Image (cartoon, helix red, strand yellow):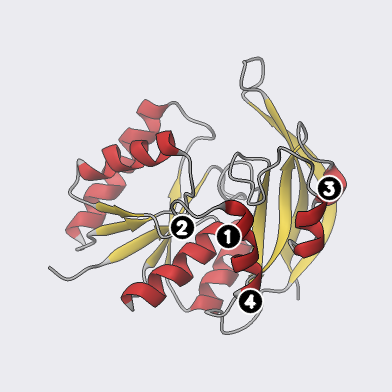
Amino acid sequence: MLMKAFIYWSGGKDATMALHVFVQQYGIVPQLLLCRTSPEGSVAAHEIPASLIQEQAKALNIPVKIIELPPFAPNTVYEETMGAVLQQLVVEGFTHAIFGDIFLEELKAYHQTIHQQYGIACVFPLWGKPTHILCNEIIDSGIETIIASVNLKHLAANLTGNFYDDALIASLPEGVDKCGENGEFHTFVLNAPLFSKPVKVKKRNRDTVTYHTGTAYETTMAFIRLEVAE
């Protein structure tokens, strides 16, 4: 059976690195699949407008399929929505799903459980890589990234908009993962080896958004408003 793949896309460095590793390994270019939680936003907590994701897709010359999801929906709602999407993808001939996960075992198992129901195999190109090494590999590969949002429990708001580079990584407090795998921060990729051109952005003001208000999982993210530069 020929492999036909899609990659869960957030616009960030891990998804981009996973894309690059997958293309290098298999020589197959996957479709982008973006799960966004509002007409304006990207995945929850990144707060990247869909217009910028479209610019990335143009630079990659890869189509992007956009799925609308309620923000931080219960698993039952997520599974019902994604089930319909996955059924359609199977009809279209897709056989593999690609993820940028690195070490969160529970999340990996959850992805596998959902996709195996529809006969879709899961691929984790970055899985098991030590993040203190992976962060350098991302930078050395030519992926140019800025910090899009931060969890204020771990990092200061003024980090948003800064480049994800050696200096920033060295400045991260002890206990913060170098790749932000625990949700400490999220990123947006401006350029990468597979891009035909950089994505030009205009930085606006910083803002905050709170998720899971009133629960044990309440989280406040600081983010920088980005838009396509003319």
**Disc 4 versus disc 2: distance between alpha carbons?**
17 Å
**Disc 2 versus disc 3: distance between alpha carbons?**
31 Å
Q: Which residue is mark 2?
A: 126
Look at the numbered discs 4 and 1 and tell me whether their residues touch, using CB distance below 8 Å. no
Q: Which residue is mark 3?
A: 206
Look at the numbered discs 2 and 1 and tell me whether their residues touch, using CB distance below 8 Å. yes
Is residue 226 left or right of 138 when viewed as pictured? right
Sequence-wise, the earlier of marks 3 and 1 is 1
Sequence-wise, the earlier of marks 4 and 2 is 2
Secondary structure found at label 4: loop
**Disc 2 versus disc 1: distance between alpha carbons?**
8 Å
Q: Nearer the viewer, mark 2 or mark 3?
A: 2
Residue 121 lies, in percent from the top left, at 24, 53
Secondary structure found at label 1: helix
Residue 182 lies, in percent from the top left, at 60, 39
Look at the numbered discs 4 and 2 and tell me whether their residues touch, using CB distance below 8 Å. no
- Residue depicted at x 47% and y 54%: 100
Q: Quadrant of residue 204?
A: bottom right
Q: Amino acid at mark 2?
A: Leu
Other-residue count near label 4 (Cα within 10 Å), few / some / many at <14 / 14–19 / ≥20: few
Secondary structure found at label 3: strand
Q: Amino acid at mark 4?
A: Gly
